[in-house]
Amino acid sequence: MLADKSLVLVGAGRMGGAMLRGWLELGLDPARVCVIEPFPSPELAALCAKSGASLNPAAPPAAPDALVLAVKPQTLDAAAPSLGALVGPGTLVLSIMAGKTIADIAARVPAAKAIVRAMPNTPAAVGRGISGVCASRDVSEGQRALAHALLSAIGSVEWLAGEDLIDAVTAVSGSGPAYVFLLAECMAVAGEKAGLPRDVAERLARATVEGSGELMRQDAGKTPAELRVAVTSPGGTTAAALHVLMGPDGLGSLMDRAIAAATRRAAELSG
C-alpha cells in the first residue's frame, strides 16, 4: 500500500518521528519521503541520512499523495501559508494535531479537501499506539485506505462515525497512558506503605502493569471484565481489594469523572 506513495511529513518530533520510522519499516520508498522539521533531533537527522529520506529540502515536492501534519497545534497558523503550496488535487491531508478540527485545517489551508484527523497516543513510540480517526466527506476510499496504512505503522486504528467523538477518544486513549502510569505509581506507593522497600514495590507494580497488558493483548477474546473475574477467587485477597476499588466511590466512579473532565477540556481546546 505504501511502497509507491509519495509523502511529505511536516513536523517530526516524537510522534512524527515514530511514524516515519514505522513507514520506512513497512516499505515506504525513502526517496519519495520529504521531512520538514526546523529543529531536527540528531536521531531524526541520522535516520534521514541513513535511509535516504529528504530532510528540509530547499524546494519541498508539491502535490504528494499524502501530507502529514504532525506540528504543534499552536504553530498551524504560522505554517499554513507554506502548506497550501504542497497540496495538490489528489493530496490526502492527515493531521495528528491535537485540538485542531477538520474545519480549522480547511480554513487555514483552503487547498486541502481530503482531510483525515487522527488522535494517536504515546505508545505509538514503540509501535503499540492506537489512533481514533475521522474523515472529511471528500476523502475517497483509496485515501481512507492510505490513511489507515499510514497510521497502522504506529499501532491500531479505530475509525469513528463522526468528528464529534474525537474529544472522547482524546479522553480515553489520548490521555489514557497517563492513567495507567498513575495506577502503577499508586500501587507502588501503597506497597511501600504496606512494608515493601520502595524499589521493590516499584518493580512489582511496573511488572504487574506490563504483564497484565500483555496478557490482555494475547487473550483478546476475553473482555477486561472476564479477565478480572478469572483472577478473582471468592473470599480471597483480590476480592477484598476489589470490594474497595469497585465500591460507590471507587475506581469506576473516579474514572467516569476523569474521562468526563478530560472530554470537556478537549472540547474547550478544540473550540
Image: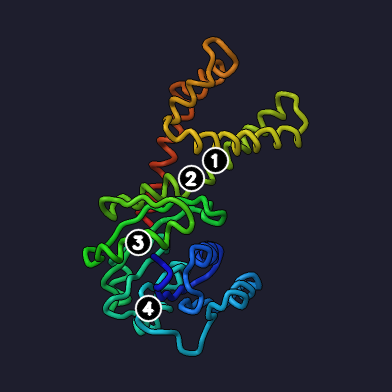
How far apart marks 1 and 3 lie (CA) works out to: 25 Å
Amino acid type indicated by mark 2: Gly
Which element carries disc 1, helix, strand or loop? helix
Dot 2 and dot 1 residues touching (CB under 8 Å): yes
Dot 2 and dot 3 residues touching (CB under 8 Å): no
How far apart marks 2 and 4 lie (CA) works out to: 33 Å
| For residue 258, above or below residue 19 | above
Dot 2 and dot 4 residues touching (CB under 8 Å): no
Q: Quadrant of the C terminus?
A: bottom left
Which element carries disc 3, helix, strand or loop? strand
| For residue 194, above or below residue 45 | above
Please tell me how crowded label 2 is: few (under 14), some (14-19), or many (20+) other residues with Cα within 10 Å. Answer: some
Q: Please name the residue that numbered disc 1 is placed on.
A: 180
Left-right relation of 156 to 193: left
Dot 3 and dot 4 residues touching (CB under 8 Å): no
How far apart marks 3 and 4 lie (CA) works out to: 18 Å
Mark drawn on residue 176: 2
Q: Which residue is drawn at 46% across and 67% down?
A: 70
Quadrant of the image occupied by residue 94: bottom left
Q: Residue at x 47, y 69 (%)?
A: 28
| For residue 188, above or below residue 74 | above
The spot of residue 35 in percent (x, y) is 50, 76
User: Upstream in the sequence, badge 2 or badge 3?
Assistant: 3
Indicate which label's residue lies in the foreground, 1 or 4: 4
User: Upstream in the sequence, badge 3 or badge 4?
Assistant: 4
Q: Residue at x 32, y 75 (%)?
A: 91
Amino acid type indicated by mark 4: Pro
Which element carries disc 2, helix, strand or loop? helix
Q: Please name the residue that numbered disc 4 is placed on.
A: 64
Quadrant of the image occupied by residue 44: bottom right
- Note whether residue 110 is visible: no
